[in-house]
Image (tube, rainbow, N blue to C red):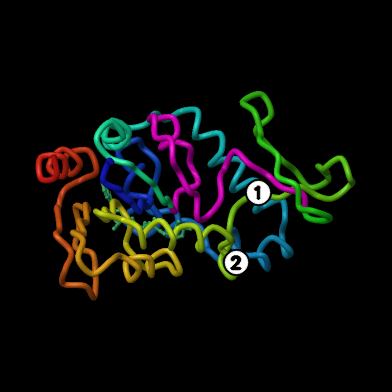
Amino acid sequence: MKKRLVVLTGAGMSAESGIATFRGAGGLWNNERVEDVATPEGFHRNPQKVLDFYNKRRKELFDVEPNEGHRILAELEEKFDVRIITQNVDNLHERGGSSNVIHLHGELMKVRSMGGKEEVFELTEDNLEIHVGDKCPKGYQLRPHIVWFGEPVPEIENAVKEVEKADIFLIIGTSMQVYPAAGLINYAPRDIPIYLIDPNQVLLHNDRVQVIQKGASEGMKEFVSLVE
Ligand code: APR
């Protein structure tokens, strides 16, 4: 029976692929106001501005590749039952070969109708943009399938269940500032090892965490040497 490795990732996991983080130097939130592009109120105020913000990020996906950190994580599936819980809305874990990925904050390649059953649709490379007036078959406006600040996080219960069954808990590339994602660490069983990979200092009120102060790719190599 393979040990269960549960991994919580954030924007730093995709940094080496060239996707900007949110709160570091040059971070997305340094150039945009969260309230304008990542809240329901912002969408209501100026829907096309919000749709364009995600249209731009969605198109960027086709200019970047998974990095070595993504690939090492996928390779670990040979030795561990790997369950990834990501805050990222990019598709780099999947493109890097990981097979069990929970997206807590939604997915850039998906959009959903704003009425009825809020059906979800997958966009394709030849149809990457949505605009005001783009509607689902039932006539409701389409919006990004992204969890905005102040909205519920439907996948959090599934994520908690995964962390509660972890044999090893690994955190990569997140400043642990956004809840409920950051609260997942509190569900890790008391007797399991917790590792954190981040090149910078991450404020954690948890002295159990073994810190690997490196970027995702180099950090993953060190992690593998510690657990294999
Ligand atoms: N490798 C690993 N980690 C890195 C790297 C790297 N090469 N470069 C930066 N980091 C770390 C930073 O030090 C920081 O701790 O990645 C973390 C990124 O933190 P944030 O920018 O706050 O991103 P994240 O924690 O994922 O944000 C959580 O906030 O804005 C919302 O919904 C958005 O999912 C996002 C959530």
Q: Residue at x 37, y 52 (%)?
A: 10
Q: Which dot marks residue 144?
A: 1
Foreground: 43 or 81? Answer: 81
Q: At 66% from the left edge and 24% from the top edge, which residue is drawn?
A: 126
Looking at the image, which is closer to me, 109 or 54? 109
> Where is residue 214 shown, x and y percent of the image?
16, 48
Earlier in the chain: of badge 1 and badge 2, it is 1
Give coordinates of residue 9: x percent, y percent: 35, 51
Which amino acid is tagged 1?
Answer: Pro
* Highlighted range, magenta: 87-113
Left of 2 or right of it: where is 35? right
The residue that label 2 is drawn on is 152
Which mark lies nearer to you, 1 or 2?
Answer: 2
Residue at the far top: name it: 126
Check residue 111 for magenta coloring. Answer: yes
**Residue 44 lies in what quarter of the image?**
bottom right
Residue at image location 84% in from the left, 55% down from the top: 116
Q: Residues within 10 Å of mark 1 (few under 14, many from 20)?
A: many
- Percent x, y of residue 80: 27, 40
Residue 66, image x, y percentages: 37, 31
Callout 2: CB less than 8 Å from ligand 1: no
Ligand 1 occupies quarter: bottom left
